[in-house]
Image (cartoon, rainbow, N blue to C red):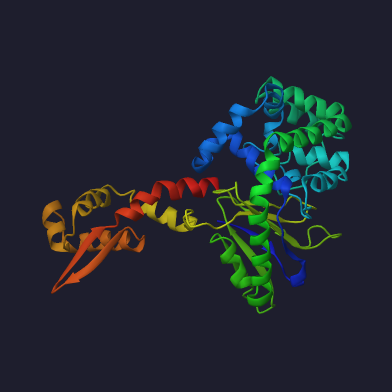
Amino acid sequence: MSNVIDLTGLPPERIVFAPSPLAELGAALHALSEPGHHPGLHGWVTATTAALKTDLADRLCEADFLWRSARSDLLLPPRPGATLAEDLDHMDTIDDERFVAAAFEITCSASYSRPTPSPLVDAEERARVREMAAARGPRQAAFTDRMLTDPDGLRVWVRRLFEDCEDAFFGDIWRRVGIQLAADARHKTELLRRKGLAETLPATSAALSLEEAQDGSGGLRILVDKLASGRTTAFADAADPGITFLPTSFGWPHLLFSHAPGWRPVLQYPVASPELPAPAALELVQQRLEALGHPMRMQLCRTLSRGPHTTGELATAFGITAPEVSRHVATLKKAGLIQTRRRGRYVLHQLDLQVVARLGSDFLEGVLR
């Protein structure tokens, strides 16, 4: 399962790598709302939450559907600025109908990839988003009503909220991580210039790859390995064609893909660091889970976890034929769950404990990606 971005005919200079203060603030706010997604940030989350003033904490709770379960496209600017103020100035240029629709496009929209009317002008859509907001609690319902009845006033409120976050904690964060993100963006830009997109994408994230059209047309598309389906083109925004990559320090394990109709596609990727494992392909995670779904293979894994065994030993231990053992072993080996080595005329099989230990986190990272 992949998301697809069609790049056919796109000039290389339209592929932009740049850090965004607003996008990084969105990632930090998400971590505060969902610390379970980010175990490496528990210390920072605890300290930051304890230091928040009550008024700011309450306001963040009101607006957290903009970044909690998913990230609003408003927080992923296609043309990022050098400062949070510049990003917020760009957000201010979005008209009210598009702004309000974008606020609800993921958490309250029936189909993210299909255009839906703005709740400011469509009564049915307005009733639906109110119902969805009410299910999240009275504060979110009140926030939604304010956005629908006074979008201009609410937009001023949102900007002030982000500015207060900058004063309270994000200013220090950006001074620390902004330099790192800018360096990563420069590195990717230079890699793109020297090596091309085919080498730049996997260097950006192992979940990204470039595919050429099979019909010989010369078409190119980016594949984003996520447990979701989406399709867009780099020419989605006719006024500003291209694609933007935003590095993030707070975003792992999420790889965000913004592709709402009429918006320039944006990808936010976690910057590489030695302590972050490379993401496993979702197809491989599925293959490993399916391999372990058979009761006999589970029993074989129990034995193989204790030490190396031959096919004959396994057949005797479980009362099945050697060919049956070989078929089960082949399935486990194809999924990368066991290792084999030859000792004289014997072939020994053993469970790869490190791979199995990673399976739970690989699955979790896959669904969070």
Q: Quadrant of residue 221?
A: bottom right
Task: Residue at 74% x, 31% y: name it.
Answer: 129
Residue 133: quadrant of the picture: top right
User: Could you tell me residue 260's position as x and y percent?
Assistant: 74, 50
Image vertical order of residue 285 relative to residue 138, above or below:
below
**Front-lying residue, 314 or 77:** 77
Work out whether 143 lies above or below 254. Answer: above
> Residue 211 occupies which quadrant of the picture?
bottom right
Left/right placement of residue 223 relative to residue 111 reads left
Q: Which residue is located at x 72 percent, y 51 percent?
A: 20
Where in the figure is residue 285, as x and y percent of width and height? 43, 54
In the foreground, 320 or 362: 362
Residue at the top extreme of this rendering: 138
- Left/right placement of residue 360 relative to residue 106 reads left
- What residue is at 86 percent from the left and 39 percent from the top? 97
x, y percentage for residue 356?
A: 34, 52
Q: Indicate the quadrant containing the N terminus: top left, top right, bottom left or bottom right.
A: bottom right
- The answer to whether any part of residue 106 appears in the image is no
Residue appearing at x 68%, y 58% in the figure: 182
In percent of width and height, residue 185 lies at: 67, 61
Residue 37: tell me if it is visible.
yes
Observer-nearest residue: 314 or 153? 153
Q: How many marks?
A: 0
